[in-house]
Image: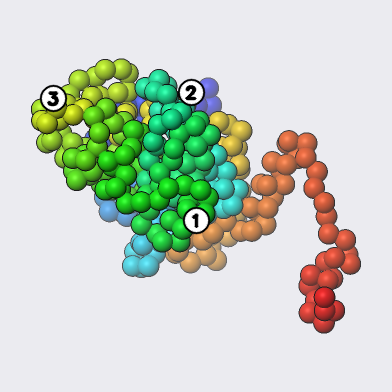
Amino acid sequence: MRDCNIPVFAIKGEDNDSYYSHIMAAVDHKPQITMDDGADLVSVLHTKRTAELANVIGGTEETTTGVIRLRAMAKEGVLRYPIVAVNDADTKHLFDNRYGTGQSTIDGIIRATNFLLAGSKFVVAGYGWCGRGLASRARGTGAEVIVTEIDPTKALEAVMDGFRVMSMEEAAKLGDVFCTVTGNKNVLAKQHFELMKDGAIISNSGHFNVEIDIPSLEKLSSSKRTTRTFVEEYSLKDGRRINLLGEGRLINLAAAEGHPASVMDMSFADQALSLEYMVKNYASLEKKVYTVPAELDKRVAKLKLESLGIKIDRLTSEQEEYLASWNEGT
């Protein structure tokens, strides 16, 4: 970025105040387009820096949590410009969320702890695309995977995929390693810490550290110490110990290197093409959240296949006619 004369406002391990000071510094540049990851930039523009909204023509959003927030804003009629939900593109969530998060999260947990996952009980909180990927990769290490969910359809899918499914209160008694990938807050909370076995490892790879109720863990503890880089051991008043990884931040970024470029390339292609679409069409778009146009999504998949040297079949004219008609029968 330095070589391209692009200012960057970010540091590894920033606290909450630094995080928002960096957002403010970016807003000082009076952006015309926003590319967000969690909707905090959009939120700041709509609350603390509303004067800058006049410059903004549109934006994109990268994450599941961000899209949920933006749709809530649109529903309430407070969203002030159109935004494309990049996260909803098939070439984003089916690959970045599933394969990227799955691999990089396991990588982060292992780097931080050097814990042997084979034979352990690994609890995945949430069975969205990130949870699906993480559960699959954890099973690949030889761990016994337990999934917790609030959505009955996703819970049933996890069962059909061969995972044990139960409530977090049940799982808390069994798990050796826990990882939250929900996008919600207090997924691991006081009542769960009180049930965990001595030496349990807890981590997050879904949203910010709010997924783990760290203040409650602090209150339950008599002391804490850093035992390894990215590992804080909390000694509970009853003698048990709980190990928190990466201060509850995204462990795949805190202790590892995030997603490999070979899966992020599709997400960034979706971002770039969605921004181009926004620049060309913003004047005719309403102030709401849009999905990535299907033709752009397919284009990214096609480009990825071409980069891998893979060819696929095409429909013949006869097949196209058959699929498009109703009067030919079977």
Horizontal side, residue 221 vs residue 40: left or right = left
Q: Nearer the viewer, residue 309 or 172?
A: 172
**Pointer 2 and pointer 3: residues touching (CB < 8 Å)?**
no
Question: Helix, strand or loop at disc 3?
Answer: strand
Q: Which mark is residue 313?
A: none
Q: Please give the name of the residue rendered at 40% of the width and 59% of the height, measured from the top-left corner.
A: 151
Quarter holding residue 71:
bottom left
208 above or below 78? above
Whether residue 39 appears in this view of the structure is no
N-terminal-most mark, 1 or 3: 1
Q: Position of residue 189 (x, y in %)?
A: 22, 44
Question: Helix, strand or loop at disc 2?
Answer: loop
Q: Position of residue 204 (x, y in %)?
A: 35, 37
Q: CA distance from mark 1 to mark 3?
A: 40 Å
The residue that label 1 is drawn on is: 157
Q: Nearer the viewer, residue 77 or 189?
A: 189
The residue that label 2 is drawn on is: 2
Whether residue 172 appears in this view of the structure is yes
Q: CA distance from mark 2 to mark 3?
A: 42 Å
Horizontal side, residue 239 vs residue 57: left or right = left
Amino acid type, callout 1: Glu
